[in-house]
Amino acid sequence: MARVVKVFRTLRNHWKKSTFAVCVLSYGGYWLYGKHCDSLLRREACLVAREFGRQQIAPQERLRKATVILNPAACSGKANNLFEKNAAPILHLAGVEVTVVKTDYEGQAKKLMEFMEQTDMVIVAGGDGTLQEVVTGLLRRPDQDSFSNTPIGFIPLGSHNSLSPSLHLLSDNKVKDITSATLSILKGETVPLDVLQIKGEKEQPVFALMGLRWGAFRDVAATISKYWYLGPLKTNAAHWFSTLREWPLVREVSVSCLAPSLRPPDLPPYNKPPRPNLLHRIIRRLKNYYSPPVEGELMEEPEKWEEKQLSTLELFVQTHNKNPVERGAGGVYNIDNEEYEAMPVEVMLLPRKLRFFMSAERREQLLSQAQ
């Protein structure tokens, strides 16, 4: 008992050192517990991936090929380490033939996609900027009609991952988000997503998955990080200082648009019909030769554009990709959280243009919310 009293008396007499030691031990224990949980998540995901790798394939079949576009600079330079520790082992255990292409500078992913060879799937490992470059490069290809059928997987490794909540169930654990996104690629369930084609006066079109944003709130969001020293008040401070500096915040914009039309129905996956036999082809050609079909002239109705003058704080043109399973002047633009110089642009919706891998759990959750 005397020894216990002596220990407490020592802690009381050296309370500063005792407090510091408790803080260090608490932080160390929390850090070790987090590392342990991460290792358990990796192990569980690898066990699931190993079951995919053990599946037998026919002799004439080949391994699935995946081309990974990895941005090592994402997540403050941690993206490469995150991918190698959490995503790459899962893909290899599942028997996927992986080709990793790392980008060295901004805009390189667009060029890589324009010259990339055909693959079974494209995996984007990065953030909003990397994803937007990959989609833009893919849809600028001359053969984009056929190449756009290639499914795309998105592994969230960036600081901003706007599309990820639409495809996967997110948590506060980065490792869990990466492993679940990688497993959803292996399971193969896809969902069609809309794409916005944004074309300026001179440059090639840019393609976006979430939308185009321009206005006061976009400008404020770009300056929030400057007030990091204010902690939780930095967002309020950014709005306050921006209001004082740029009042009034109203933007004047001219919008020309077509009347709304019905969305096209979901088309089943295209399967090439079998080729007819030789006799059937000869008869069809002879019939077309002696009695060619009459081509009637189709009169297209001119498009009726309606011009509107708007006065607003914020202009936001967005897609339905936040819930893909439910169908119902000066400054800077934000296109999928990437900055572009503001200029007159033409925005066209390309419905269900690309297919992305999506987790079954997230699909069920979105369907339950829509009901």
Image (spheres, rainbow, N blue to C red):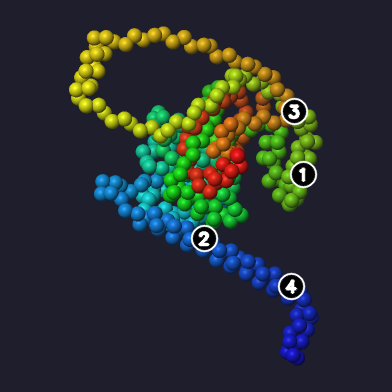
Q: Is residue 111 visible?
A: no
Q: Amino acid at mark 2?
A: Leu
The residue where tag 1 is placed is: 237
The residue where tag 2 is placed is: 41
Which class describes the residues within 10 Å of circle 2: few (<14), some (14-19), or many (20+)? some
User: Along the horizontal axis of the image, is 258 left or right of 66?
Assistant: right
Residue nearest the observer in this picture, 355 or 89: 355
Earlier residue among tags 4 and 1 = 4
Tell me the residue at 41%/34% (across/down).
269
Which image quadrant: the N terminus?
A: bottom right
Q: What is the distance, in whole Å, between disc 2 and disc 3 at their CAs? A: 48 Å
User: Along the horizontal axis of the image, is 328 left or right of 235?
Assistant: left
Which class describes the residues within 10 Å of circle 3: few (<14), some (14-19), or many (20+)? some
Which class describes the residues within 10 Å of circle 1: few (<14), some (14-19), or many (20+)? some
x and y percentages locating residue 307 in the rendered image: 64, 17
User: Along the horizontal axis of the image, is 254 left or right of 11?
Assistant: left
Q: What is the distance, in whole Å, between disc 4 and disc 1 at their CAs? A: 34 Å
- Element under label 3? loop
Tell me the residue at 32%/53% (across/down).
56
Earlier residue among tags 2 and 1 = 2
Total count of labels = 4
The picture quadrant where one finds residue 333 is top right
Earlier residue among tags 2 and 3 = 2
Q: Amino acid at mark 4?
A: Thr
Q: Is residue 282 above or below residue 85?
A: above
Residue nearest the observer in this picture, 241 or 215: 215
Foreground tag (2 vs 1): 2
